[in-house]
Amino acid sequence: MLSSDFTFIITTFRSGSVIDDCLKDLPKQTRKIVIENSGDVDLKKKIEKNYSNTECVIMTENFGYGKANNFGILKSTTDYIFIINPDTKLKNESFEKIVSILKDKDFAIAAPQIVEKDKVYKQNKDNVEVKKVDHVPGMAMILNKKKFKGEYFDENFFLYLEEIDLCKRIIDQGDNILEINVEVNHLGNQSHGGYDLEMEKSRNWHWMWSNFYYYKKHNNYFYSFLKTLPNFISSGFKFTYYYIFNNEKKKWQYKMRFLGLLNSYMLKKSFYRPYNNKN
């Protein structure tokens, strides 16, 4: 395993304010494929002008995180894929250390430890070099393509839980997921340029839709309905409360959670797209 055996896949959506900090520290000799979901032609030109060994592909519409990553994976020619969010900062020395650690390891998925301002995603309490785990966060994760047989992210997920679903399928087929004792910084909620109400609507709609779909996929409709029903009832009551007391942010938060679950209960596809919907 060498650094040249990797391709970085970065899915962007309105990520112009953070993508430079992500790309500038990545190893120049390793290929990068940026999948641009917001149709930003200027961003494509800027990236391909300023960064060598980097291709930016503009999708015809916003296909979501999983489908965009799948597109990049299928476009790659290397055995290993390193998926990172555009608001993730992976320094070259950290990457080389990860490669060195993984050289003799049998794995399907591996991931460094993600460090955010107020949170560390760490399951390895003993600080060993690598630890087998059941799942890893999707902000920075490595896929060994030889273990996947051409099946990667479930494209029915538009946003949220697609990496948890992928990890569960890997565990179910008897392959290893490793957490590597190397820290990587993640800004958190900055991949699309920060908070606004439309992104808040999208996040809450998809969080609930994806929860029901995930439980239904791996169990059944009735189990998933009972699992998510408390959220459905709570969201309806809280929407009504915040509507009466005119709290705009909270009103939309719980309305979108309610609608995400309602549409999932009705077995509708994950159709909500930020900036393209009227509610």
Image (spheres, rainbow, N blue to C red):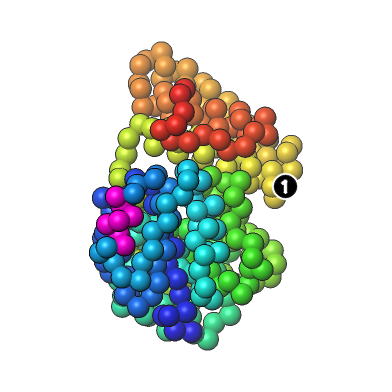
Q: Nearer the viewer, residue 30 or 160?
A: 30
Q: Position of residue 65 (x, y in %)?
A: 49, 50
According to the image, label 1 marks what residue?
219
Helix, strand or loop status at disc 1: loop
Does residue 64 appear in this view? yes
The residue sitting at the bottom extreme is 104
Does residue 110 appear in this view? no
Q: Residue at x 44, y 31 (%)?
A: 276
Extent of the magenta region: 42-48
Q: Residue at x 42, y 56 (%)?
A: 57
In this rendering, would 155 be left or right of 9? right
Total marks placed? 1
Q: Nearer the viewer, residue 39 or 80?
A: 39
Q: Residue at x 34, y 47 (%)?
A: 40
Q: Nearer the viewer, residue 246 or 210?
A: 210
Q: Position of residue 137 (x, y in %)?
A: 47, 58
Q: Position of residue 90 (x, y in %)?
A: 33, 68
The amino acid beneath tag 1 is: Asn
Q: Residue at x 38, y 59 (%)?
A: 56
The residue sitting at the top extreme is 244
**Is the stretch drawn in magenta largely helix, strand or loop?**
helix
Q: Which quadrant would residue 44 be assigned to in this image?
A: bottom left
